[in-house]
Amino acid sequence: MLQHYMKRFLFGILSLGLLLAGCQEPVDPVVEKVAGPKLVSSDPADGAKDLTGEKLTLVMTFDQNIKCPSAQREKITVDNGAVIDNVNPNMAELKIELSSLEGGKTYSVYLPAGTVQGYKTDQDGSDEMRVSFSMKYIEPYVPSDLNPVKTLVNPNASQQAKNVYNFLLEQSGKKTLSGVQSSHSHKNDFIDAVYNHTGRHPALAGYDFLFLQFSPTPDNWSWVQNYNDISAPKEQWAANGLVNYMWHWNVPNSKADWDNGVNNYNFDGYAFYCDKTSFDIREALKPGTWQNDFIMKDIEEVAGYLQLLEDENIPVIWRPLHEAAGNYDLYGPNGAWFWWGRNGAEPCKQLWRLLYDQLVNVYGLDNLIWVWTVDVTKGAEDQYLDWYPGDEYVDILGVDIYEANTDAKTRQYQALVDLTKGKKLVTVSECGNIPDPAKCMEAGNKWSWFMVWCNSDSNGNIVLTPSDNNFKLNTSDYWKQVMSSPYVMTREDMPSLK
């Protein structure tokens, strides 16, 4: 009986406990809030100064992968007139593309709280963020005007050289002289071909000391005329035309090649392209080396041929060491294609100054008008000044242009004028397709002359319209149009400058 009552008592106590427990409020489980994404770094950094360019991509890096919903992207702002072109979250980075940036201004990119979000459940958004930076003030570009100096760099220049230079000054902005580069035969074959087709002679004839080491040449080298025969430039000058010389300077790989080449008229071992010769301009500039002996001997020899012209009172528009900086599309960064430019600007400038000093001060040649030629490649303009020998060594600036159009070449023109702030005349010292004279005058491009490069067929006959894209716009009709243009001077228009 007692056991029965005890069981009922214990059951009552248990039931009361359960009843009381059921009357208590439920307790929620504890859930920890996850912190939002934190900015680790930005590029540019907050407070960055002197940034350049009209466009910029702000890259914000966070401590985790992030997202930025479209509704949040629209809340991002930037002050001071800049434009947000795109907002792109990717992994742990947020890229904000900005444009319309101006030099001298400070910009601040603002992201409200919650703009950037993480991927974790119950995670806060980012804190409010701001990244500021300033743009460098750059003087606005003002193109230089052509206002060339009135004298040649050689104070002892001959009267005929002065006459030619003064004539070029007078014609600047009025007429461009027509010119053609002769074939390697040292004859007036290209001049005559243009005359036979158009009835007018080019005003300027170009020749090349390409075969200097082999002159005078053997009798069976009839296709290369000896340089001591100056009948072609004499004929051009006598007819009131002007004379231009350049120099594809062949060099040997070794002293043995030098000896063998000179003695046996052997081209093996000689070249002017970088990929054909290992000749080192740096060694050539050191007295006592065989390379220096070679170039000094060559300079002496070329001086002798130029002296023949001076003896006849023939001034020479002289264009050595052309295209020194090379063609960067062909040989890659710093890839000059002629040996005189392979080791950079400084040795090349030293060689130019050495050549000037030897020809003018040592050999006393006063009939030279010095033309320096820049690189041809688009994008190389910022390197022109690095390669420029200096105002005291250059009379005229030239650019060699081979393009599949007849445009006025405004980009090249303005780059040349800017180089010396307009102190030097400028010219198209080589070209394929001839820049349209009317377009040039309309653009205000005061080219002193153009010089069309020579092309010939397998039989050695001059081809006025080669199939190459850089020449084929020089059609039969275009040649006639150019040579009869009121903006072009032919030999028939030239006065005597003797």
Image (cartoon, grey):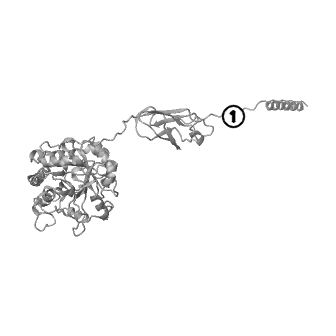
**Residue 472 lies in what quarter of the image?**
bottom left
Q: Is residue 121 above or below residue 403?
A: above
* Residue labelled with disc 1: 29
Q: Is residue 475 visible?
A: no
| Front one among 74 and 35 | 74
Q: Residue furthest bottom?
A: 459
Q: Residue at 21% x, 41% y: name it.
A: 149
Q: Residue at 21% x, 44% y: name it.
A: 389
Q: Residue at 17% x, 43% y: name it.
A: 153
The x, y position of residue 476, in whole percent, is: 30, 65
Q: Is residue 346 visible?
A: yes
**In the image, what residue type sits under mark 1?**
Pro
Tell me if 393 is positioned left or right of 468 in this view: left
**Residue 309 lies in what quarter of the image?**
bottom left
Q: Secondary structure at mark 1?
A: loop
The x, y position of residue 475, in whole percent, is: 31, 63
Q: Residue furthest right?
A: 1
